[in-house]
Image (cartoon, helix red, strand yellow):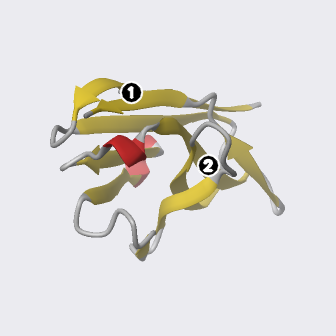
């Protein structure tokens, strides 16, 4: 079985910073893509950022220049450094990973971590 465990959410004032972590564990062959999504109350889940094993990153326009994704392939862990946080960043943040356990892949999600930014 595979698990994604997130940590690092919390309450912060606008302009502050938080760092999220997501570690994948279990029977894993390789993880081509890891990333973060978020879902605010009453809204659809949206992509925040992704990081491929080869080092390619993508960011939503709303977080470019403020958020930075990084990855430790040896630890199967992805991080999200969030700076200059705004109230509109308030959401539950979910880690997602595309994982090969054998020759086929599946998408796995973390349990979510709450990020609340006060004005």
Q: Residue at x 23, y 68 (%)?
A: 65
Mark 1 or mark 2, which is nearer to you? 1
Residue 92, position as x, y percentages in the image? 54, 35
The reply to whether dot 1 and dot 2 touch (C-beta < 8 Å) is no
> Quick one: which residue is furthest to the right in this view?
104
Q: Residue at x 71, y 44 (%)?
A: 108
Residue 36, position as x, y percentages in the image? 51, 51
Q: Distance between the residues labelled 1 and 2?
A: 16 Å
Q: Quadrant of residue 39?
A: top right
Quadrant where the N terminus is found in the figure: top right
- Residue matched to label 1: 9
Q: In which quarter of the image is residue 63?
A: bottom left
- Residue matched to label 2: 96
The local secondary structure at tag 2 comes to strand
Relative to 69, residue 28 above or below? above
Using the image as rendered, state which of residue 103 and residue 68 is in the foreground.
68
């Amino acid at each position: 079985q595979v698990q994604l465990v997130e940590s690092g959410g919390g309450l912060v004032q606008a302009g502050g910073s938080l760092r999220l972590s997501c570690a994948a564990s279990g029977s894993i062959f390789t993880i081509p893509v890891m990333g973060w999504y978020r879902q605010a109350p009453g809204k659809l889940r949206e992509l925040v950022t992704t990081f491929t094993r080869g080092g390619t990153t993508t960011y939503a326009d709303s977080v470019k220049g403020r958020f930075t994704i990084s990855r430790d392939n040896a630890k199967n862990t992805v991080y999200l450094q969030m700076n200059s946080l705004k109230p509109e960043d308030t959401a539950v943040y979910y880690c997602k990973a595309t994982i090969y356990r054998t020759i086929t892949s599946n998408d796995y999600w973390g349990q979510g971590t709450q990020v609340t930014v006060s004005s």
